[in-house]
Image (cartoon, helix red, strand yellow):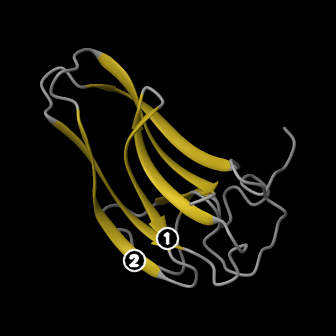
Amino acid sequence: MALTAFTSRVGLGQGRIRPQRTTPASGEYLFVLGDEEPGHFFELAPGDFAEVTQAVDVTDAALVRCALRFRVPAGAPAGLAWEASLAVDGVKYARTLGRPGRERLITDLVANVSKLSGVHTVGVRLELVSP
């Protein structure tokens, strides 16, 4: 597997890790899209992303919700922004833009799945976008 900005430190500051800089809301682990430790620099282009997906049976569900801590580096490229989104079957149902140098807890990324049934792919994506 080729190492990228999103995979070069898997298990240390990326992917499923036991975090050092924050306390998980539940359990001992977090899934980090990006890097937990600041100061790692990579060349990225609009459209570059990292995501985690899971197959979910939404038959009796009305909503799918995620909670995340969204931390954007102060040195975000000019004219670009980091976007966190919640998608079902690749379609973005909710998204938010992060401001450079800011960190916030997001609890309102919600997808209305009341009209869906069966197993669908639910994902959280971190993407560099042109706002």
> For the residue labelled by badge 1, is the local secondary structure a helix, a strand or a loop?
strand
Q: Quadrant of residue 91?
A: top left
**Where's residue 74, x and y in %?**
64, 84
Total marks placed:
2
Residue placed at 68% from the left, 69% from the top? Answer: 79
The residue at 60%/66% (across/down) is 81
**Which residue corresponds to the image point at 18% horizontal and 39% vertical from the top-left?**
63
Q: Position of residue 15 (x, y in %)?
A: 60, 54
Q: Measuring 66% from the left and 58% from the top, which residue is drawn there?
A: 11
| Mark closest to the chain's N terminus, 2 or 1 | 1
Q: Position of residue 96 (x, y in %)?
A: 41, 60
Quarter containing the C terminus: bottom right
Residues marked 2 and 1 touching at CB (< 8 Å): yes
Q: Is residue 74 above or below residue 43?
A: below
Viewer-nearest of labels 2 and 1?
Answer: 1
Q: Is residue 97 left or right of residue 42?
A: left
- Marks 2 and 1 sit apart, C-alpha to C-alpha, by 8 Å
> Residue 98: which disc?
1
- Which amino acid, mark 1? Gly
Residue 104 numbered tag: 2
Using the rendered image of the protein, determine whether residue 46 is visible from the camera's viewpoint: yes
